[in-house]
Image: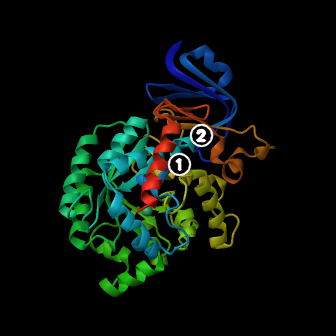
Amino acid sequence: MNDVDSIIVPRWVVPVVPRGQVLEHHAVVVDKGDIVDILPADTVTQRYTATTAYHRPDHILMPGLINAHTHAAMALFRGLADDLPLMEWLTGHIWPAETRWVSPEFVRDGTRLAIGEMLLSGTTCFNDMYFFPDTTAEVAEEMGMRAVVGLIVIDAPTAWADNPADYMHKGLAVYDRYKDSSLITTALAPHAPYTVSDAPLSDVRMYADELDIPIHIHLHETAIEVENAKQTTGVRPLARLDQLGLVNARLVAVHMTQLLEEEISRLAEVGAHVVHCPTSNLKLASGLCPAQQLLDHGVNVALGTDSAASNNTLDMFAEIRHAALLGKITTMNPNSVDAITALEMATINGAKALGLEARVGSLEIGKAADMIALDMNQVSLSPMYQPLSHLVYATERAQVSDVWVGGRAVVEHYQLQNADVARMRTMAQEWGQRIQHT
Ligand SMILES: [Zn+2]
C-alpha cells in the first residue's frame, strides 16, 4: 500500500497523450503535486490510500487548458471599446486608457479578476504579456495558478519602464526572482515589430538565448501591419525578425493571419511556434490564421484568448470551438482542425510553445497534476457518443466543476478556493466606474 495525497475517480479520463485516447473507469493518483499513476478504478484501493479522494462519477478529467496568449490585467478593460478595427481600437481607446490607468494596483486587481475567470473556466496556465510583470507573477503564485510571465519590451515609455534598456533591466530582475519557482516561468515579450526597434529586438534575442526562455511577440496580426512594415522597412515583419535572428525554436508568434507559403515553410524549418487567437481575430476582423496549413507543415500551433478587452472573455472552451470551426471554413474542408487537434492545440501544443511540455499539457505519469473535471451529466450534453467531440463542439466552460494546479485543488465544486468571488466582482465594478467616468 502506498500513501498518496489524492485520488481522482472520474467516469472518463482524456489524457490527450496518447493521441485520441479515452479511458473509462480509471483513476488518477496524485502525490506531491505530480501524477504518479493512472490505473483501472477498481484496482486503485488495493494499491493506494489517499488523504483526499475525489469521486466524480459523471465527469471527464482532462489536462488543464493552456492559454498561450493573453494580457491578464486588461480584464478591467473588458467591453471598454468594441466593434472597431485594430489600430483605431488601440490608438483611440486602449493605449490612452492604459496611459491613464496602468499601475501596480491596476495590474494586481486586473490579474486577480482574470485568474479568477480563467481558473473557473478550466485554464490552469497562461502566457502573459503586460506591464508590471512582477505583480502578475505575485498574483499568479498567490492564487495557485501556473503562468509564463512576459518580460515586456517596447520602445515607448510607460508607468513600468522608461526605455528599452529599462524594460530589459526590470524584466531580468523578474526572471531572477522567479527562476526557481514551481509555478512561474518567464519569456521575453517584445510587444510587436511595429512597437520595438531593431536594437532592443537584438537584445531580446541575446537574452533569450542566454536564459533559454521563449520569445513571445504579436506578429502579422493584420494585413495593414504587414503593408506598413514593407513601406517603412522594405520587408515583411517576419523577414525583419529573421534578419535579427529571432526566428528560431524560441519564437512564439501570436496571431499570424498573414502568411505566405515560404513563411510557413520557414517557421516549420526552424521549429517556431504559432499562437492562434480565433475570437480576437474575428472580433477585430484581423484575418484568419491558416492553422491547419501550419500543422500540415509541422508547425506547432497553440491557442490563446488574447485579452478580455479584445475577446471579451478568457474562455478557452470558446477558443477551442472557434478554432475547430474556423479551421474548416479557412480550408473549406470539414476534416480540418478536427476535435482531437483542437484539444491538442489548447493543451499539449501550448505546453510545447512555452517550453513546458515536460511538466504539463497532458495527463501522464511524472507530469504535474494540472487537471480539470467537467460534469457531463447535462441536458445540453446528452446523449454522448464521443467524449472528444463533445469537449469541442458541445461543452461550455460552465461545466468545469473542479480544477487542480500542481495537485492543489484551486476550484472545487465550481467554487474558487483561494479567492473571494463577491469581492472580486465589487472590485472590478469599482474600477469600471472610475475608468468610465474619465
Ligand atoms: Zn495580444
Residue drawn at x 28%, y 41% as measured from the top left: 178
State ligand 1's quadrant.
bottom left
Q: Position of residue 402 (x, y in %)?
A: 59, 34
> Which image quadrant is residue 129 in?
bottom left
Does 370 sit above or below residue 308? above
Which SS class for mark 1? Answer: loop
Q: Are marks 2 and 1 in contact (CB under 8 Å)?
A: yes
The residue drawn where x is 50% and y is 19% is 4
Q: Is residue 89 above or below residue 401?
A: below
Under mark 1, the amino acid is Thr
- Residue 67 visible: yes
SS type, badge 2: strand
Residue at (48% x, 30% y) in the render: 407
Query: CA gap, disc 2 to disc 1?
Result: 9 Å
Query: In the picture provided, is 180 more to the left or to the right than 431?
Result: left
The quadrant in which the C terminus is found is bottom left
**Would the CB of label 2 be found within 8 Å of ligand 1?**
no
Write down the residue under mark 1.
Answer: 347
Question: Is residue 267 found left or right of 295 in the rendered image?
Answer: left
- Left or right for 117, reference 227: right
Query: Of marks 2 and 1, which one's residue comes earlier in the chain?
Result: 2
* Label ID, residue 23: none
Badge 2 local density, few (<14 within 10 Å), some, or many (20+)?
Answer: many
Q: Could you tell me how many numbered marks the image carries?
A: 2
- Could you tell me residue 422's position as x and y percent? 53, 38
The furthest residue to the front:
437
Q: Nearer the viewer, residue 437 or 261?
A: 437
> Residue tagged by mark 2?
62
